[in-house]
Image (cartoon, coloured by chain):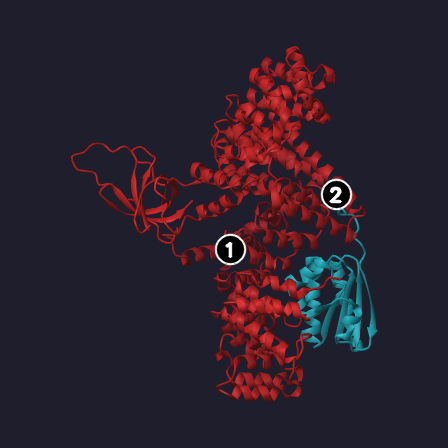
Chain colours: A cyan, B red
Amino acid sequence: MRTYDGRMSPFSCSGEARGGVYLLRTSGYLDDGGGAALQKAVDETFPKGFRNFVLNFTGSPVINSQGIAHLIEIAEIIIDEKKGRLAFTGLNDLTMNVFKMVGLLKMGSAFPTEDAAVASF
Amino acid sequence: MALDPVAALLEDLSSPDPTIRFSVLSRIEDLDWTPDTLAAFKRRLAAETDPGTRFQMQKLLTRIDRSGDAGRTLLPFGDSVLKELEALLADPARDDLSLAIVIESVRRGEAPLAAIALREAKWWDFSPVLLPSVLQFFKKFGSAEDVGQIEMMCRHADPRVLASAVEALEKLSPDSLKELIVPLLMNPVHGIRSRAIRLLYRWDPQEAIRHFEAALFSEDPNDRNAALFHAFFFPFSEIEPFMLRFLAIEDAPALLEKAGFLFRANPAPEEPLRLIEVRENCRGDKRRLVGEILTGVIDSLYRAGLVTKTPEQLTLELEEVYQRRKARQLIEGCRAALASDAGDIRKQAAMRLCDFVRLGFGEARSILNGWLPNEPDTGVRGAVEARLAAIEARPAASADLDLGGMAPEQRTRLLAGLDSERFRKIRPKLREFLRTCTPEERLLAVQAIGRAGDRTDAGLITSFLGNSDTAVVAATIEALGNIDLDALSPYLPKLIQHPADEVRSVALRIFSLFDKKQALSLVEKMFSSIQPKQRGHAISCAAQFDFPSVRDMLLTSLQREQDPENIRQYIAIFRGNLDESLWMSVFEMVENVQGTKQELLLAFCREAAETLVAEKRTAHAGFEALRQVVRSRIEAEKAKSRTAQPSYALSNIQKMRRQQTPKPEEKADTGLVQFAIVAFSVGALITALIWFLVLAPSAEPVKKPVKASKKPVQLKFDRNPKNVTGRVAEVAADGKRFLLVTEGTPPETYRIEVGSALPKAPARGTVFQGQIRPVSMDGGTVEAQLIMAY
């Protein structure tokens, strides 16, 4: 079990352009650190002109409250500041319910597959 | 992959809070629709009575219809949106639904002109059903010049408008909300209050958490629901202790499920053990639900990569760890009780330790070995030695199980160590044996039945609940609690009032499985005793509950406690439930007490700090570092208390709410209403009886004898609601009134008007119980109105 000197599962994210849409796949526990890493990854794509994003959480079956706080911030930046759009995929029963509870599904739609999410733009 | 967010969101449309229903609606607007979910949505619309929510639902349906299929909702107007908006704004006979749809269809490029058009049309005068759409528009496209009007909307009477305005202002000018926080916290709508707490967290996290805690444990389930709705916006580590206590005492399955999502989304390795403890103190559906949350958390731990063991391995391991930890905590409590001055307490503790010896806990044997030679009471020593000898003797062979033919010592040995197999062999002879055996043998036999028997054996021992030997009564409660709760439940109301402390403690623990909140309030009452011994029983009773439920109660009562024996008992419980936050709470007390109490608690804190560091359960280096943290916290609290409490402080808001709430006069006793609800859900008899016998406030003040005087004494007619029990003597022909004669001496007569509390008066000759409000006296008969019948 993890203790205070233990290590959580490492978080990583990778991205690729799909036409005008930028697809980001996360892997690992999306907590405060993971959320910050994802936010950084999104920020780095803006100078390249991307405004529409698909976030694939298949590799992050658990997203905690602080991770959710980062996701809300990311969504607000994409939608309100950058005037872009957002779609999610790879949500399981738990993350779907959490997204529903916190209103993230108001900011972006959920799709069963990456392709469906990309095609929605 | 099962992704049906629409169906899931539709469930939330049944929330009693209009702001939550409204919030749900805005979330489902852009989702995909299937014919099935669309049909479900239309059914919800048909049932929706709130005009504002209906409007939003109709708006959504219109958009879907205009899209031409049941696929995606559509923004159908393209470049013509601005023109259509201007046309609608200029038309005094416009349709609000169309205007709302057009406003929501405005695209970014047209937004500045649309904003000007809306301002010129004085959008703030629009109908309340339309305002949320306008405010959502300004949230996206508004500017500083809109802030003033939006602020005004933050005081709107319609909660949907208000919620949208708060959301818009949070985006455009969050600091403006600071001045609005008090009215928002005072708002009658739960969802608004809850959102205000979330906002407050930006400026004063500590105070916001206090508000959150108050909402989470509110008597009003809507408050609790709204608190959970916003709980995701607080760092989980800060609200975890409250959430755990919430799980422990909440009974509503829907709220428990919601809370479960928070635990599953925020898995921490230390959480499963806490959840096991909560689960072990629940029964029925709640036990199943908490078990599911536990499984979910373990699964999340594994999936998040926070543990390497599989969920199955971890579950097995944790269940074992929990059993050992709980046993260790109880053993520690017994060890502390062995130092008591009272022989009966020492004997009880030693006998309990003997039970642990039988279960294979070597530490219990070591404690007894160290204590026995110094025990001054030869009677106690002899009894414990005999029990130990019986437990440790070689079991009798199955062929030799003739209870009647055995020597007394052999019988004692057999009963003390009886296992399931040998129990089945002597089972046919037990009924007869229990009639003729000695009190010591009876006690052992009852314990054996609790250990090795089943539901069919309950009849053998139920009659011992009235036994004069309190140890037998306590053992019978324990045994029936293990083998047949239903057989025990009708007796609980009397047992929790038993004159013997040890009986009351055991009965209360079992009663908590039926109604935890009431059981906890009874334990709390025990803590207020002036007798240290009775408070000691309260502590040992609390020790049997799950720690999250009693944590605050223990810390509060420890502040008043001065008896060293009892303080040692507290420490035994704390040792078994140690974490950093508990350490800090105890150390805070150390800083404010003196003498023996300080010495005992300080010694515990030193030892506990070492444990926390050794087990890597704190990020701090040791005792000194932890002490520094607590001292800084105390200093900060002191500094804060020197300045005036902010207007939004929980205490101020609660005061203002109390002033605003009219004192209920004719309402049923709220405690009783709650109690009645529980009574119907867990077995009316036990809970209703407990209400009448134990918890109900006395209906009338005790009257002092009145001395004879020349002047007739005019007794004041008491119009306060009171509980009455009696037989229905007469029923009026119209069935709206009845005459009740109470059972007291002398009997009282009430003419009770049924009103809307019952469809018709109870039948003549039946026994009636209920709460009434006396209205007047008519001769010897009290005229009264029925508030509630039970």
Instruction: Determine the secondary structure under disc 1.
Output: helix
Labels 1, 2: front one: 2
Q: Which chain letter goes with mark 2?
A: B
Q: Nearer the viewer, residue B84 or B384?
A: B84
**CA separation in Å, label 1 and label 2:** 40 Å
- Side of A67 where B178 appears, left or right: left
Q: Nearer the viewer, residue B626 or B158?
A: B158
Q: Which chain letter goes with mark 1?
A: B
- The vertical placement of B198 against B442, above or below, is below
* Residue on which disc 1 sits: B650
Q: Give the image location of residue B91, x and y in percent.
A: 51, 88
Query: What residue is drawn where x is 55% and y is 71%?
Result: B165
The answer to the question of whether label 1 and label 2 lie on touching residues, with beta carbons closer than 8 A, is no
Amino acid on which disc 1 is placed: Leu
Number of numbered callouts drawn: 2
Image mark for residue B315? 2
